[in-house]
Amino acid sequence: MMALGMTAKSQVKIGFEVSFIEPQAHYAEVQMDLSGLQKEYTDVKMPVWAPGSYLVREFAKNVEGFTASSAGKTLKFEKIDKNTWRVFHAKANAVKINYRVYAFEVSVRTAFVDADHAFLSSTGIFMYPEGMLKSASTVKIVPFKSWSKVSTGLSPVAGQQFTYHAADFDILFDSPIEVGNQDVFGFTASGVKHEVAMVGGGNYDAARLKVDMAKIVEQGTAIYGENPNKHYTFIVHHFLRGGGGLEHLNSTVLGASREQYTTERGYMGFLELVAHEYYHLWNVKRLRPVALGPFDYDKENYTTNLWIAEGFTAYYENKLMLRAGFKTGEQFVSGLATALANVENTPGAKAQSAAEASFDAWIKFYRPNENSNNTGVSYYAKGEVIGLLMDLEIANATKGKKSLDDVMKAMYEQCKTLKRGYTDAEFKAMVEKISGISFTDFWGKYVNGTAAAEYAKYFGYAGITVKNENEGLKVPYLGLSSKRTEGKIYIASISRNSAAWVAGLNVNDEVISIDGVPVEAIIERMPAITAKKVGDVVKVDVVRDGISKTIPVTLTASPNIKLVAEINANAKPQQIAVRKSWFGI
Ligand SMILES: [Zn+2]
């Protein structure tokens, strides 16, 4: 709906040109042409963050050489805050702004330029005139002389090489651009043309990927009943060791290791990443928390629902892999049981809820320290567990007639109809509508609370027996993780309430020996620990800040669970119906 009083669409025309004079020194040259300006001055701003990655990254720190001119005359400007340049243009209505961006941070959410290619992560490259986020713009890319290709989700302008149109800045900022000599292949699936831009080598088999990636596209589309894009672009960056991904409206950026495709495990890992990022085109890009779009590019955008946006995506990654035939039912359930155990074994899962983890992503998840596992839980990991439990609860309540898939589809439709994101209450209301039961207790326990997951009950709904293999075992442990640096072993983290915690071992202590046995590898696996009993005292020799100390530690029993899942062949009809609905195969 167009509200009365809404300002008319700006008549200002905006054009960008990005070129490369010194790519080897990691610079992109940006020119922004504005015409139709009416005020005395215009504020132009650089975003401070990249949607999907919840950290203020201060992209303005990479900008230099800012100048402004009109009809060849230099204009005065001043910087009024960390990411805003005020350009005084008086009566001139056409302004040319030039600046350079230093781009040398390797990640899926930061720009990178070198002699071989340029990855333009748009929020770190393009500025926007204040108050004009709804304005359209064109982007012309001038590749460096030895480069010949551009890959992006932006729509090309007909008849103009390497020139693209963005209907507004949300679309521009959601469309990364790869420039260079990437290998490009394509496939069509679910009626959508997909382009895959492979950057930096990689021993992939394009023919196999085309077939397998199409299966993932089809399974994702089957859940929502529609694929909203006309075209979709995968930009894949290969490194010696790489990983990670970032979702966009009709594209994604993935990181992979060049040799990753050699092993079946590595190949499946890549497909899982594809499944995760592709699923995001629905979950978070369109079916999204109300705070996540339209975005405020100037500061943190808070939501308590990243456990849905990211956690459910992590969960659905498994469902797509199962349904596309890349995982067996056994692998599916045992993978989820392990994921659940990992959350239960995180001390911070008792200290921070999924809603809190979502809200504080900006200061906690993206800024971890040595104590993070004690104070918080990943909204990916906890959200995956909530998705699992919610899915089984819905399937059980409806005797297998409905599942979380129906909720996701209905919420996607609702967001589309309302043209806005959902609130937490709206999401819960939809879960209750589809399942026909109250989820107030569930929300209290698992979303806003820190209750242990009742895994035996939930898996039992689907006729799956899940047991804790560590039940009754008293495994002696210190409760720490260690790392090797330059041949020395240091303590990397200490679990809350563990033996090491109580005895006062410190993170960064160099561990020399335990009961006189020199420490050479992972401490918890040393016979000096594993051959002992709970209650035994071990003497840990450490060097702390250059001073040797001997710290007696009374070994306690590891509280960690280890879950094994077994699909019961003789399950009851309702359990089989629940399992069928849950698996979707
Ligand atoms: Zn994600």
Image (spheres, rainbow, N blue to C red):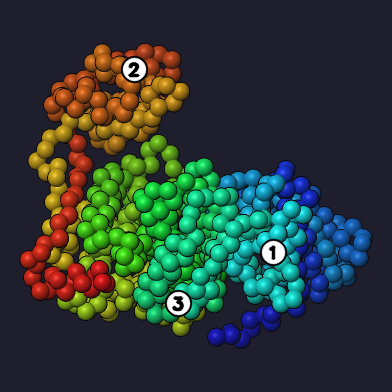
Mark drawn on residue 167: none
Q: What residue type is labelled 1?
A: Tyr
Q: In which quarter of the image is residue 45?
A: bottom right
Ligand 1 within 8 angstroms of badge 3 C-beta: no
The residue nearer to you, when weighing 88 against 430, is 430
Mark drawn on residue 190: 3
Reading the image, the residue beneath label 2 is: 512
Q: Mark 1 and mark 3: span between their CA atoms? A: 35 Å
Q: In which quarter of the image is residue 165?
A: bottom right
**Camera-nearest label, 2 or 3:** 3
47 left or right of 305 in image? right
Badge 2 or badge 3: first in the primary sequence: 3
Query: Which SS class for mark 2?
Result: strand
Reading the image, the residue beneath label 1 is: 128
Task: Check disc 2: other Cα within 10 Å, few if <14, some if 14-19, many if 20+.
Answer: many
Where does the image place residue 94, in percent across and percent down from the top left?
Answer: 84, 69
Q: What residue type is labelled 2?
A: Ile
Query: Which SS class for mark 3?
Result: loop
The answer to whether residue 304 is visible is no
Q: Residue at x 19, y 49 (%)?
A: 563
Query: Which SS class for mark 1?
Result: strand
Where does the image place residue 350, in percent across and percent down from the top left?
Answer: 27, 48
Badge 1 or badge 3: first in the primary sequence: 1
Q: Residue at x 59, y 58 (%)?
A: 183
Where does the image place residue 174, in percent across and percent down from the top left?
Answer: 58, 65
Q: What residue type is labelled 3?
A: Ser
Q: Which residue is drawn at 16% across and 34% down?
A: 475
The residue nearer to you, when weighing 207 against 308, is 207
Asked if labels 3 and 2 touch by Cβ distance under 8 angstroms, the answer is no
